[in-house]
Image (cartoon, rainbow, N blue to C red):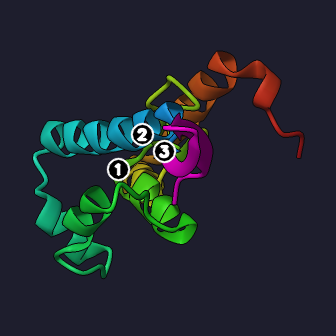
Amino acid sequence: MCKQQELFIPINLNSTKIYIEEVICMDIVNDFFYKVSNLLYDKKISKHKMLTDLGLSRNSFVDWKKNNNLPRGDVLIKMANYLNVSVDYLLGLDKKTSPSFPSDELIEEAIHLFRKMSLDEQKALLQFLKAMYPSRNRSK
């Protein structure tokens, strides 16, 4: 939920206290929904499918939007992993769409393809990866 800011507006010598939501907070919420919608569109996934896959209520998206709220932290993490982006990206704190870690799905696919290769192909791929990322080589 967004932080609220007190604003006093004098009306006919009486002070009336009203609350407004901070513009920045509203921008984060609107940006979040825009980014999620675009990511779903790009991946050809419906909001309903994502919510179902994550075990969330069909109305979650509508409720968050209607109440101008972001999902709970644990749900943000699930959504970021599902969309293969970082939570920071969804919240507008990071402009990069790529996460800092590969998804489990990506790792499983790489392992599956690696196992289909011959021993010579596996060795050649490892040599290529080591040459491409020399600073990440592990000594055995």
- The residue to which callout 3 is attached is 21
Residue 11's x, y, as percent? 48, 38
Image point (88%, 46%), residue name: 140
For residue 60, side relative to residue 43 (left or right) = right
In the image, taking residue 111 as reference, residue 62 lies left or right, namely left
Residue hosting label 2: 26
User: Does residue 79 appear left or right of residue 101 in this picture?
Assistant: left
Disc 3 is placed on an element classified as strand
Against 93, residue 109 (above or below) is below
**Nearer-the-camera pick, 125 or 118:** 125
User: Are there few (<14), some (14-19), or many (20+) residues within 10 Å of tag 1?
Assistant: many
Q: Nearer the viewer, mark 1 or mark 3?
A: 3
Residue appearing at x 32%, y 62% in the figure: 67
Identify the residue shown where x is 68% and y is 26%: 130
Q: Are marks 3 and 2 in contact (CB under 8 Å)?
A: yes
Q: Is residue 114 magenta?
A: no
Sooner in the amino-acid sequence: mark 1 or mark 2: 2
Q: Please rate how many residues cluster around mark 2, counting C-alpha atoms within 10 Å: few if below 14, some from 14 to 19, many from 20.
A: some
At mark 1, the secondary structure is helix
Name the residue nearer the viewer: 105 or 75.
Answer: 75
Q: Is residue 134 above or below residue 9?
A: above
Q: What residue span does the magenta drawing correspond to?
A: 1-19
The CA distance from mark 1 to mark 2 is 22 Å
Q: Amino acid at mark 3?
A: Glu
